[in-house]
Image (tube, rainbow, N blue to C red):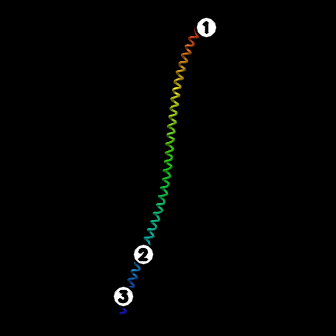
Amino acid sequence: RSSNATKQIDALVKTIQSDTNEAISSMERSTTEVVSGAKLSQDAGTALEQIEAVSHQLADLITNISDAARQQAQAAVSTSDSMNVIQEITMQTSTGTNESAASIGRLLELANELRTSVSGFKLP
């Protein structure tokens, strides 16, 4: 009976050892997967940090572009205003030139009339 009990105990010990070895292998695989998952999580965190940094850089660039566009729009308005002033001055100059030409024409007529009037007088 003792031999039979010893065989049962031996079989039980072998079963326990086999189950223990299987549990250890399973735990090692799980540990490897956990380490791999942690590495993937760390890599994802690093990628997200890089994405955040690039997003901040893009936001800064967009702000700079927006500021430059606003300044260019203001410069365009200023240029347009200046062109309107130049056009007004040009119109005034043109009007003044036409008036001067008319005055010169009238002065020429008066000079001719004066010459005609004076031609009748003779000095002794």
Residue that sits furthest to the top in the current view? 124
Residue that sits furthest to the right in the current view? 124
Q: Say what secondary structure mark 3 lies in.
A: helix
Q: CA distance from mark 1 to mark 3?
A: 168 Å
Residue type (three-letter) at the residue carrying disc 1: Lys
Residue 97 is situated, as x and y percent measured from the top left of the image, at: 53, 25
Residue type (three-letter) at the residue carrying disc 3: Gln
Give neighbour class at mark 3: few <14, some 14-19, many 20+ (Cα, 10 Å).
few
Quick one: label 1 or label 2, which is nearer the N terminus? 2
Q: Nearer the viewer, residue 10 or 46?
A: 46
Q: Residue at label 3? A: 8
Residue 60 is situated, as x and y percent measured from the top left of the image, at: 50, 52
Residue type (three-letter) at the residue carrying disc 2: Met
Quarter of the image that includes the N terminus: bottom left
Give neighbour class at mark 2: few <14, some 14-19, many 20+ (Cα, 10 Å).
few
Q: CA distance from mark 3 to mark 2?
A: 28 Å
Residue 23 is situated, as x and y percent measured from the top left of the image, at: 40, 78
Quarter of the image that includes the C terminus: top right
Q: Nearer the viewer, residue 48 or 36?
A: 48
Q: Reply above or below: 48 against 89.
A: below
Comparing labels 1 and 3, the label whose residue is closer to the camera: 1
Q: Reply above or below: 99 against 88.
A: above
Q: Residue at label 1? A: 122
Q: Residue at label 2? A: 27
